[in-house]
Structure formats: structure tokens, C-alpha cells
Amino acid sequence: MTSEKSHFPILGFLVICSMMIQISAKYEYQTKYLDVPLDHFTYVNETVTFKMRYLVNDTYNSDGKGPILFYTGNEGDIENFAQNTGFMWEIAPKLKASLVFAEHRYYGKTLPFGNASYDSPKHLGYLTSEQALADFADLLAEINPSNRSSRGRPVIAFGGSYGGMLAAWFRMKYPHLVTGAIASSAPIRQFDTDCGVFSQILTSVFSVSYTKECSVNIANSWDVLKNYSSTADGLKVLKDKFKFCGNITKAEDITGTFFDYLTDVYGNLAMINYPYNSSFLAPVPAYPVREFCGRLAQNFTGMELIGRLQEALSIYSNYTGQTKCLNIANAYDDNMGTSGWDFQSCTEMWMPMCSEGSGKDMFPKKPWDEKKFSDDCFKQFGVRPKKNAALTAYGGLHLDGASNIVFSNGLMDPWSGGGVLRSSNNAIKIVLIPEGAHHIDLRAADENDPGSVRGARQVHLQNIQMWIKQYRKRLHG
Amino acid sequence: MTSEKSHFPILGFLVICSMMIQISAKYEYQTKYLDVPLDHFTYVNETVTFKMRYLVNDTYNSDGKGPILFYTGNEGDIENFAQNTGFMWEIAPKLKASLVFAEHRYYGKTLPFGNASYDSPKHLGYLTSEQALADFADLLAEINPSNRSSRGRPVIAFGGSYGGMLAAWFRMKYPHLVTGAIASSAPIRQFDTDCGVFSQILTSVFSVSYTKECSVNIANSWDVLKNYSSTADGLKVLKDKFKFCGNITKAEDITGTFFDYLTDVYGNLAMINYPYNSSFLAPVPAYPVREFCGRLAQNFTGMELIGRLQEALSIYSNYTGQTKCLNIANAYDDNMGTSGWDFQSCTEMWMPMCSEGSGKDMFPKKPWDEKKFSDDCFKQFGVRPKKNAALTAYGGLHLDGASNIVFSNGLMDPWSGGGVLRSSNNAIKIVLIPEGAHHIDLRAADENDPGSVRGARQVHLQNIQMWIKQYRKRLHG
């Protein structure tokens, strides 16, 4: 469904990983729950609450007055974000900070209606970013109370991807609760940008990572695959070559499902193109795009192209060598996490995506089809997108009134096209990471990190320290 | 009900006037309607909309590029605010501005469920400040569209009292839509201040306006009235003296209903203590507190005190001389407007009020009774107050992250105790009007205005012009 709608992993990708991958428990925390209102903005059922999960580590807050580093959870299990946001853990001791990771409603274990949370629009309708931010605000009001005679501890919000959007918006909407925000790879301009930007950046990443031929091969592969898909024999050839798990019986299994799968994989590879082995979305080697493109480094055609593509793909689909078959149908299966993001993209998170083909990008031409997108949403969820909702609520790129936010973007991240890359507001800081993939700066430091990533983390820390200092000065000044 | 709960006119006063008084049509405008969602923050019934009324005057916007002066309607008929906010009309020609007055949901003609809007919690539950602000945001997105390639016209929000709170919050929550805000007599700190501040300021106003004896007489009157109310004969004496419209059959009609009425009248008199005849809450002469206190200028006792009190009261209750009887029961009758504010004060607009008596203020001792307040709310509306809702949502006095707001307060306004009277944030401007009553600076200029009111309006205009200039500089810079 996701891929039908946009053929891009509209940020929903983060969920998949938490479903697919064992979360490695590098960092430790307490798991807690807070009762929050199902609906913060009406009094129709004002007594209905649910349990929001959050994770806390207070080890470093030795004097009880340190700042709170607060991760604004996005579309997935919060434990995965806690384990993959090493930067917060690394700066906490220096800042004597507490760590808090708050889970976004309708993801992980934070299910307002339990297992029935996704079973009808009546239940799912409370899944919005505004409600999630209000949950986070209630949590801060609870754990960090503030009143006219005593002010709470300074709070720094962190988030990557949709979580980065939430971190920025949390500071913008609740500046009395949030002192500053590090918003990494947060495409808050994606609501109002060219639909083809994502495809173009992606193409560029696959062009420069090894040889130019990589993106040319990908661009040529669609027609080759399509040709094979047009006959039963051809379908069998593809089935044998790629070792699909399910049956491949018609052309659309290739030109629909498999094309979408490939598109998602290319997007994911670019996002997790980290300089070290990682398992955030899938277990992959260091610089997986380079590895991928190394297998497509010359101009291939026909069956050889298909063979090389299959080999390259295994970087992502079978790096461990333990995958028996290629599951293309279930990559966006209807599990809770992806349904959640699908619902959000069908309501307020309306981010048009398209590709132009014809040399402008490496994808088949696929114009943005607003009507089909809306109809699909209505079919699946009984809702239609509110096209301008996010822009009206949050302002898109218009950040004149905002302050104390760092927007960081890796320029090799396809989402950077929707990111904030410049600012005419002194209180909004921009960090560009030329070699960076998706929110790499929030990950734990690694000896293979390029200088720009190390530099980004230094700038983050400097800003955080400045915000905390300003906050304390106001308290005592 | 209102008075039972707090014995102060918790801002609900504005509604009464629109019910009681013919709105004089000094200013002209077009009346328009916009369909807005019943619920901006869920997708449970996302297709349900209603018609929000708004008033527009485009006469002065000669080049089509002028700013928009936007009144954030509060708890009453928007036409009354349009007619009583002369300041906006007076600066519009100079700024070549459009004027827009947006009606708050559930007041005036903006009734989401028509005549059934107030008939059940299911209908009334959508009455919140956040939903109202989102209505206003939708209206601006509609009449002043902005996107990445073209930015809309600058917008300045205006409001007095609860409307001033909304104007400030509108800038704080939607700075991309609102360039700056003039928040007059906006008690945004009232959620987190001493419950007795209102009574104390009120007492001070009645002490200094003529002679000190005025507040002493009021302080003494409660016991005298109570004594008369304890016998049937005494009740008859009071009935004859005050010419109550309804029957007075028991002590509580005096110590309950009439005490509440008097308390409301004293609050209203101070709020509308303007230096000229006015009819905002009731037709009254210039400086009505002075007029009132002129009739209580010496120390009176017993029946003479009652007689003088009745005479003084007529300044408010019968200045036109056409009132046949004194309607104390219906001052806060269950009409839509007051019910609306009662509901808001029973949910998020939780403003504890109390009086201490014993010389500290001129009222009978009445501690804040949180439990009774909550129980009364539950009885009337089936809801209980969310004590910290407004503080969590808007931050109370913590305005570090806010900008481009002027908070103005008349220091003779009892609401100034909850107002923002100082700022350590350069982008938040404070205007104090020593002689000022409730949002006098938003009213039309009058030859009797004291210098501080004229000065306040000049400061407002300077700030507005500065904000507009900055906005345009950013656009073209």
C-alpha cells in the first residue's frame, strides 16, 4: 500500500527495522509508563487515557539538576531509537544529564486501544503529530514540573527523520518546556517542495558512490525486468534468479510489487549509507551504496544486468547470508508500524513523491497522482489527506518566529531535499554534513566517521551548552 | 452558576453585554463564513465542519498588499468586539490595512451544532482555545495563503481580555502566520497566581477612586445585608429598597444570588472605569467607579448604608433610568454565552479566585474551594477541570521563546494581577497604563483619554510598524 501510493518509503521505513531486527541492548534504561489523555484537544471523552511508554536513564544526573535530553519518539519502537541514538548517551555524562526517550502514540508498546488500536478509523483517528507532541508535553510537565516560583531543569529535544520534525516542532510549539532542539534529517519542508527531489538526490548518490554506471544500470534495469515479466517463462527466470519467497504469477508482481521493493531498497541503502557495518534498517556492510554499486560498476545489459543486480541487492537483502528467499511482498506488509505511518501520510503528513525518468533520475517515470493517492487512503482508512494541515500547523520553511533549533542534514541523504538547509534567522542553526547519510550525527561515534560528522556533533554540543547556559542565566539573572 | 463557582466574573462578562446591549453599528464590514473542521486534531470525524463567522473590511487596503489586522474573537458576539475595538479601525487607514474580526467557536453566530451546540458534553466538548486558534489559523491560511514561492501579507493579531490571551497565544503557536500581537489586559498568568489578587486590586480601585470610605462601606455592607436577610421582614425591606425583579423568599437569595451579583458589578465597574460614557457592559457614565463611590463617600451604617448602596448601584443597573426592576438572578443566566465561558473555566481555563475579607479586601471571606468548583463543573457539564492544561499548553508566565508581543495592562484593572507586567525578553514588550481600566487601549480614541492611554496606543503603533517592516525586509532582503 505504501509503495502503491508513493513508491517511496515515506519515512515509514523506521518501523520495518524494529520489526525485522533484534534490537541490540547496548544502552540501559528503566521502562516507565504515564497515563495521557487519548484526546488532548476536546472534552468529548476527556477521561479516556492510555499508557505512554518512556525510557529513562538517570545515572549521570548526579546533582539532580542536570538537563534532560529528551528523544521525541517517531514511527517505531522507542527502544530502537534509544539504542540507535548513541550521541545522546555519549554527551549525557559530560552534561550530567538525564536521558528520556518517549514513545510516539500508536507505535511500539504505546497503543491507545491495545491490539485494537488499528482496527478502525474510530480508534486510529487519534494518531496525529499534535496529539503526540501534547503527550510529550504532559510527560515533561510530569517529570519536570515548573511553576511561577520554581522553574524546571533545561530540556533539550532530539530526534531524527520524523522524530527530528517532532523535536523541532516541540521546541516551536512548547518553548516554555523545551529549551532547544537538535533536529537531524528532519524534512519539514517536504510538504511544500518538488515531488521529484527525493528521486534526484537518490540518483546522485548512486552515481557518485562508485562509478556513474551504477545509476545507469539501475535506470536500464526497469525495462529489462519489465520485458522478462511479460511472459510466463520470463517470470520463471526472474523467480529463479531472485529467489522470491512467494509465487510470481503475473507481470504486476514484478512491475508493481518488485519495482516498489527495489525503489524502497535504494532509498534505504542511501539513508543507511554509514561508514561502518550497521543494522538499523537491515544488517549491511560499511558504505552499503558503494558495496552495492561496486557490483554494478560497468555497463551491463540483459540477463547479465539482472544477475548483477541480484548480487548487488544481496548487500541489503542477505548480507548475513542466512536469508533463504527474498520477501518482496511483505516489506511493507500490514503490520502496525507501517500502517501507522501510512495513516499519518494519508492525513496530515502529506508528502508528494514522484520520479521523472528520462535521464533526470534513475527511476521509471511516475508522476505524483494526487487523486489515486487520496482514493487509496480513503479505501484503506476511510480518510482523505488534509493537504495543507502540516503547513498550516507548523509553517513549513517559514521559521521566522522559531529559535534554538539546529537543523542538521547529510547531503547524501535523499531526505535532505526536504530539509532546512539555510536560515536567515540567527537563532536557527544549520549543520550540513557533505558525506552524511540519514541522521548519522545522532548515532554513536565511530572511528570511521568522517570529519564532517564529528564536526556536526561538536556543533550540536556547543549549541546545547549555550542553550543550557542561557536558560540558567535567565533563571538566576 | 458562575458566581457560585468563583464569585467573580471569570471573564465571562463580555458575553453578557452582547446579550443585554444593542450593538451600535459605528463601523462597517462584510460578514463572511468559512467552513472549518469541528475537530482539528483527530481524524475520527474528520469530514464534519461548521461555519465560522468573520467580519472583513478591505476599504483601506488600497494596493492589496497591506497588513491584515486580525482580531482573535473571544467569548461573545464578534460584532460587539468589532464595534468596541476602535483602535484597530483608527490605525487601519494609516497602515493601508485590511480588518478581520474572527468569531470564536460556540459564541455569537459561530455555533458548531446550531441551537444544539450547548445541549450535551458531546456537542460542547469541542469548545477549547486550541481548537479556536486552529480555526483562526485555517482562516488565515485561506485568506492569506503563503507557500515556498510567495509569502502572504503581514498579520497583526489583536485581542482584549481572553481575546488578548488568544492574540498572544496565536503569535506564540503560529508565528509563521502571525507577525506580531497586541495582547491587551490578557491575564495569561491567572492560572498560576494568588487567588486573592483580583479582590485586592478591586478593593484598591474602590479605595482610591473617590474616598477611602467607599471600600469600607462595601466591606461593611455584607453583614448589614446578611442581617436583613435573616428575617422575613428584613427580606421585604431589601426587596422594596432594591426593587428586585423576582421574589426574595430566603436568606440565600441575598447572601448567595445578590452577593454574587454585587461582586460581579464591582468587578465590572472597575473593568469599564473609562473616562467617558460607555455601554460596553452596561450603559454607564464616565469614571463609573468615581460616580459610584461619590455616593458612598462617608462612613454609613445600617439602613442608611443600604440606601446609599442602592443609589450607588443604580449607576450600573439603571443609568438610563429606564430599568423597572433589578434583575439579579439573570445576570449570569444560562444563556449560551455565559455557559460557554463556564464550560471553558470548567475545563482548561482554570483560574482560582478567592477573597480574604478581614481588611485585606472589601469582600466576605471566601476561600478557593477546589473540590466544590470541580463538583459543580461535573454537575453542570459532566467534566472536571484540567488544572494544568493551560499552563502546559501555553506556559503561563514563561515567555522565553516568544517574540513580537505587546502585553498592555491598565493598572486599575483587576485583571492586571494576572497580566504580564514585566519581561526579561527583549522581544516581548510591556505597556503599563497607570490609570487604565480593562483593555481601554483597544477602544477608540476619546478626548478624555489620559496621556498614558494615548501613549500606549502610540507604542502599539510603533511596534506594529516595526514588525511589519521587519517582515517585509525578510521577504525582500
Image (cartoon, coloured by chain):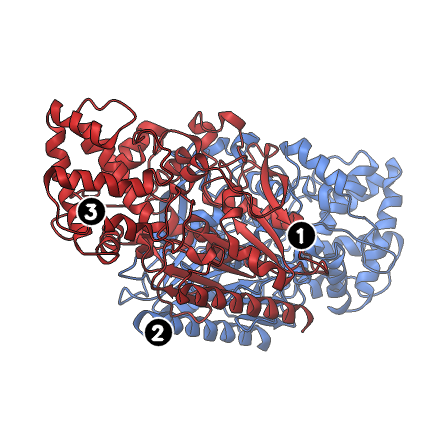
Chain colours: A blue, B red
Please identify the quarter of the rendering in which residue A422 is found: bottom right
- Packing grade of label 1 (10 A; few <14, some 14-19, many >=20) is some
Q: Where residue A393 appears, x then y in whole percent?
A: 57, 51
Task: Please state the chain letter of the residue tagged with numbered disc 1 in the rendered image.
Answer: B
Q: Amino acid at mark 1?
A: Asp
Kindly report the distance in space between the C-alpha atoms of the residues bearing marks 2 and 1: 46 Å
B261 sits left or right of A423 in the view: left
Whether residue B337 is visible, yes or no, is yes
Query: Which label was assigned to residue B58?
Result: 1
B205 versus A96 height, above or below: above
* Quadrant in which the N terminus of chain A is drawn: top right
B93 versus B127 height, above or below: below
Image point 53% across, 64% down: which residue? A402
Residues at badges 1 and 3 in contact (C-beta under 8 Å)? no
- Packing grade of label 3 (10 A; few <14, some 14-19, many >=20) is many
A314 versus A344 height, above or below: below
Instruction: Give the SS element for disc 1.
Output: loop
Residues at badges 2 and 1 in contact (C-beta under 8 Å)? no
Find disc 2 in the rendering and name its residue.
A473
B415 sits left or right of A192 in the view: left
Image point 23% across, 50% down: which residue? B196
Kindly report the distance in space between the C-alpha atoms of the residues bearing marks 2 and 3: 36 Å
Along the viewing direction, whichever of A172 and A269 lies nearer the viewer: A172
Looking at marks 1 and 3 on the same chain, the residue that comes earlier in the sequence is marked by: 1
Q: Where residue B198 appears, x then y in whole percent?
A: 27, 51
Query: Which label was assigned to residue B355?
Result: 3
Task: Please state the chain letter of the residue tagged with numbered disc 3 in the rendered image.
Answer: B
Query: Which label was assigned to residue B50?
Result: none
A284 sits left or right of A367 in the view: left
Whether residue B373 is visible, yes or no, is no
